[in-house]
Amino acid sequence: MSWLEGKRVLVTGGAGFLGREVCRELQEHEPNLIVAPRSVDYDLRDRGAIVSMLEDHRPDALIHLAAVVGGIGANRENPGRYFYENAIMGIELVEQCRLAQVAKTVLIGSICSYPKHTPVPFCEDQLWNGYPEETNAPYGLAKKMLLVQAQAYRQQYGMNAINLLPVNLYGPGDNFNTASSHVIPALIRKVQEAQLTRSRFIEAWGTGSASREFLFVRDAAKAITAATDRYDGGEPVNIGSGAEIAIRELTELICELSGYEGEIRWDATKPDGQPRRCLDTTRATAAFGFSAETSLRDGLTETIAWWNRQGDRESRAA
């Protein structure tokens, strides 16, 4: 029997890219209620709003997905905002969950919390061996403080708060905003726009030598739901696909899958970010049986098709 069966589950950020998939996945466990409150109803930066949210919905489990996020450019332009808003939301939420005696609190951290030069694959035990990569350190450290808080509250109050560390996510419904998107949606949009304008080249940030690991959004939702249902440990858990790819290879793959044959011009004046990112996911497999199911090629194919349909709809509407 699933622990989630018959429970009341609240998902902050439940209307977002990842949140929608988590809410769908939760339904398979037959909870009594899934609540996905909107930020216009409860501003999670405000203690009073959090108290009201918990009083209104009385959750047995809370999954904290709400975050202020973006790619390298957005992190460089908003370091103070990304630190403050992510830290204050999480810290106040955990404290109020403790006071409201929420049975289980699930915190979603970030691969950005790892030190800049962590040996690959990143193991959870290496999390404190250095300072994060500078361009997203404020965001990564804000998320890292919630791990400290969860462990401290577990030690002092016996609070069941767990912390998951996902890699970069992608998939249908991702953020394709040119000012704040991550690398995959940014590249897909660049390629599509180059095709529409018949441009013979696209420009990509950095040198292409940095590597990343990516996880399809539905796989991430499965991992988060499985952990909510079955994991009660105090140690953080990596959530990823276990597959690493260079940004140059990723860009070439997106061009191939999109049918774009133009030139890729690399702008080395722009930052690469952390040199390498790839997770050791053995703890997730051992703790709650998770392993990614969607290959990068299959996930990109679906994501590109989704975005192209969005573009077609916008063109028809115009």
Image (cartoon, grey):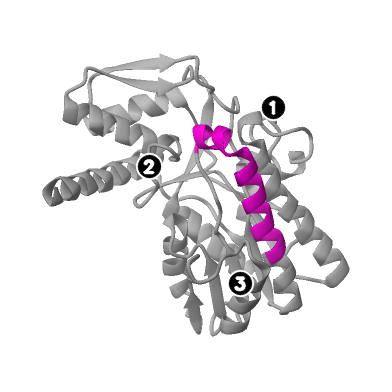
For marks 2 and 3, give the one nearer the viewer. Answer: 3
* Residue at mark 3: 49
Which quadrant would the N terminus be assigned to in this image? Answer: bottom right
Q: Amino acid at mark 3?
A: Ala
For marks 3 and 1, give the one nearer the viewer: 3
Give residue 231's mark: none
Q: Earlier in the sequence, mark 3 or mark 1?
A: 3
Q: Secondary structure at mark 2?
A: loop
The Cα–Cα distance between marks 2 and 3, rounded to whole angstroms, is 28 Å
Give, as a single range, the part of the protein colored magenta.
Answer: 71-92
Name the residue at 70% across, 43% down. 141
User: On the image, numbered disc 2 is attached to which residue?
Assistant: 177
Amino acid type, callout 1: His
Q: Amino acid at mark 2?
A: Asn
Kindly indicate whether the residue at mark 1 contacts the one at mark 3 (C-beta within 8 angstroms): no
Residue at image x 60%, y 28%?
274
SS class, disc 3: helix
Q: Is residue 60 magenta?
A: no
Residue 117, label in figure: 1
Vertically, is 298 above or below 120?
below
Can residue 97 be seen in this snapshot?
yes
Q: x%, y% of residue 40?
A: 48, 67
Describe residue 224's horizontal placement relative to residue 253 as left or right.
right
Quote the CA–CA distance across marks 3 and 1.
39 Å
Q: Along the polypeptide, which appears first: circle 2 or circle 3? A: 3
Q: Residue at x 40, y 29 (%)?
A: 250
Residue 280 visible to the viewer: no
Q: Where's residue 112, x and y in %?
A: 62, 40
Mark 1 vs 2: CB contact within 8 A = no
Q: Nearer the viewer, residue 255 or 288?
A: 255
Seen at 43% across and 64% down, the residue is 15
Q: Is residue 87 magenta?
A: yes
